[in-house]
Image (cartoon, grey):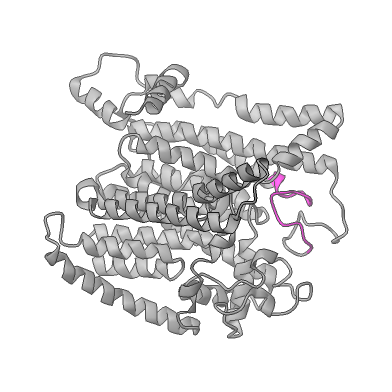
Amino acid sequence: MSTLERTIVVAENRYTPISNFRPDQLTNWSFLKVPAAIGFLAMTLIAIGGSFFDSPFKLNMVHTWFFGEPRSSAQAATPLTLMFSVAFTFGGMFLFMRMWLRLSEVVKYHAGAPEKILRRILWLWAIPMIVAPIMFSRDVFSYAAQGEMTSYHVSPYTNGPWSLSPPGTNSFVNPVDPLWGNTPAPYGPFFLWLDSLIVKITGHHELASVVGLRLLEMLAVFIMSFAVPGIARSLGRDGGEALVFGVMNPLVLLTLIGGAHNDAMMVALLCLGIWWALRDHRIAGIVACTLAAMIKAPALLGVVYIAWTWRGPLASYRERIRPLAVGAVASLIPIFITTWLAGFGFGWVKNLATPGTVVNWAAPATGLAILIRNIGHWFGATVPFKGILAVTRAVGMMSAISIALALFFTADKRGWVRNLGLTFVAFVLLGPVIQPWYMTWGVALVGCSYVKREHFWVMSLVIVTPFIDMPGGRQLMSGLVKASAPVMLITLLCLVAAILAPLGRWTQWSWPPHRILSADEQTLLDARA
């Protein structure tokens, strides 16, 4: 254990109730109604914060949602509503993070949390995000425009959404981020087909198409709520803990439902395929993972892992060749069918690097290049930023590939589901750009299969990544300086209450009293620490 990890363990034991935790199986989970209520309150605050017409957390454009939009493009923001929007949203996020951390501790140390009740809590928490405007990203408007293009047989693989018509003249085009206006789509044919189907069902109505896409991602989260605990049970783990960690986390609720990202459907099909494979339905699992890859390509790793581990941990490299061949053939069928349904061939393959056009400081490979450029500017030197960025990103990607290969060839020893999840995490962290919703790829799988301190590190990523490139911080600081005393007081009270308000005794109710542990209990506690 590293010095940093030892410091964290000491802090946990001294400053949190973790020192009282004892592995145990509870018979009464009635206290779950308390975190259910706290989570619903937190998500409601976030939804309210995003529903002001000038909220920095959503697109403020006429006709982009049913409420909370400006009455005209000329309507100006007001300091009061802007301040409340930022305070409610950040306050709700802080409160939800605190509650989720405590709930994760409960289910980690007490097996047997009822999955049926946890799923009901998940949907209770999701209600505010379902009703709220599209938040934290405007990618779903690009999806809708690409669905419109596909429905008219205009290839999104060679044209950007602005090819439909000039900006300002089309309801599908207007909300699209200018960064992606002329950018071809990197998404697989299965998503484009689903996308166009939603556009046709909604009668080519832009806002109705956006709602349909959010409903599609809700369906995906519903599938995840069964598949993720199913994977855990197949691995001999607790399904309730996997459900809380992998599905009921802030990333899923805020980005996959709140932002309506198509990563939800990718992760759902990937987890479904892995669950089927673990239950010896490997062909069905490969097909499901292939469909996931036909939404976003990284899911193809699931196919490779299922085929590689088909014959078991004692299989030789030669014995693995046939399953790999069978997996390849089984993958070709859904690939060709979905490609035929979309009707645009394999043009999406050449667009896979499209997300890398974003220069995001949070990605270490990109952040290092930005740091080098800034240091050069401080010393008055001219720095070729594009060249340095290409080098740092190449180093990051080669590092990710090296880690992925090491994990792949140790999958039998370490657990292939765990290694697959860690591979996704490595590619996201070392890739050219980090978006919060990318982290859901690996979190769902690691939540089913983590070992020892991996739980802490992945949980830390879940807590931190929603705040990556989060707007509103600057508006909050400048607003506090300019606000009147009553507004400043109310804003600060909201934030302080979210950060410091007690969550109730439910986080300690379930812990048994101190007693001397048996050798078996101490071993179990050490293994879970």
In percent of width and height, residue 90 lies at: 66, 38
Whether residue 29 appears in this view of the structure is no
In this rendering, position of residue 241 left or right of residue 35: left
Residue 320 versus residue 35 in the image, above or below: below
Q: Is residue 182 magenta?
A: no
Residue 338 image-quadrant placement: bottom left
What stretch of residues is rendered in magenta? Answer: 48-62
- Picture quarter with the C terminus: top left
Whether residue 322 appears in this view of the structure is yes
In this rendering, position of residue 230 left or right of residue 367: left
Identify the residue at horizontal 73%, vertical 63% (top origin). 64
In percent of width and height, residue 186 lies at: 52, 70
Residue 367 versus residue 34 in the image, above or below: below
Residue 401 image-quadrant placement: bottom left
Residue 344 versus residue 411 in the image, above or below: below
In this rendering, position of residue 525 left or right of residue 182: left
Viewer-proximal residue among 377 and 79: 377
In percent of width and height, residue 295 lies at: 46, 68
